[in-house]
Amino acid sequence: MSRFLIPVLFILSWLQALGAENVSAEEQQSRYVTLVYGDMSVLQDFNSNLRLNSTLESAIHQKNVITTADEVLAKVDIVIEKVQVVLSMFPDNYHVHVVLLPDVSEISRIYKEKYGKNVTNIAYYSISEKTIYISVADTRLRVLAHEIGHSVVDYYFQQVRPPYNIHELMAQFAEQHVTD
């Protein structure tokens, strides 16, 4: 099974667990990201919560933004590009899935399903799936930059993965400097 199909299957199972009928997941793609979300309200909330600083926001005007999905994809691509600059890492063929979940309880449920551990993370990056899972209710620029930092480091060091502490330091550095 493709590692890229796994996030879509998880969001579908999440929707089924909530009792949704005619279950479907929306998916949008850009240069760097495949965005997966349950419905338009989740996407709109994510867009509202992801506030860029004025420098990053000005880059949006250079993009072709018509719909909410276009705006979200543009924002995420801009954050990815900024994180790559901050880390001075520009991995080839970089593409990450971002799964938008309503809140931390859904992040916890999915993490428990996958890894058998109880967590209260507001977001996490799955190395094996090349996927960021993020709580829309807790979305902030720095949270997204941190998780993107993990993914950029993962893609950059494909031959030899750095130790976890180094990986985490690089993600924290991206989080701290995304607004520079």
Image (spheres, rainbow, N blue to C red):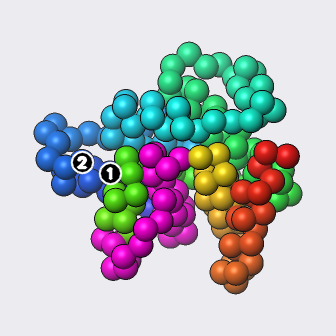
**Amino acid beneath label 1:** Ile
Residue sticking out furthest to the top? 66
The reply to whether residue 5 is visible in this rendering is: no
148 versus 55 height, above or below: below
Nearer-the-camera pick, 28 or 79: 79
Is residue 55 within the magenta segment?
no
> Where's residue 65, x and y in %?
61, 19
Q: Which residues are magenta?
A: 112-139
Residue sticking out furthest to the bottom? 163
**Circle 1: is it few (<14), some (14-19), or many (20+) Cα within 10 Å?**
many
Is residue 125 within the magenta segment?
yes
Question: Which residue is located at x 63 percent, y 31 percent?
Answer: 74
Q: Say whether residue 49 is left or right of residue 179.
A: left
> Where's residue 146, x and y in %?
66, 58
134 versus 1 height, above or below: above
Q: CA distance from mark 1 to mark 2?
A: 6 Å
**Amino acid beneath label 2:** Leu
Residue assigned mark 1: 11
Are the residues flagged by discs 1 and 2 in contact, CB closer than 8 Å? Answer: yes
68 versus 175 height, above or below: above
> Where's residue 72, x and y in %?
56, 32
Question: Which residue is located at x 37 percent, y 79 percent?
Answer: 117
Residue assigned mark 2: 15
> Where's residue 18, x and y in %?
19, 49
Locate residue 33: give its quadrant. top right
Q: The N terminus appears in which quarter of the rendering?
A: bottom left
Nearer-the-camera pick, 177 or 110: 177
Under tag 2, what secondary structure?
helix
Question: Which residue is located at x 70 percent, y 47 percent?
Answer: 80
The reply to whether residue 28 is visible in this rendering is: yes
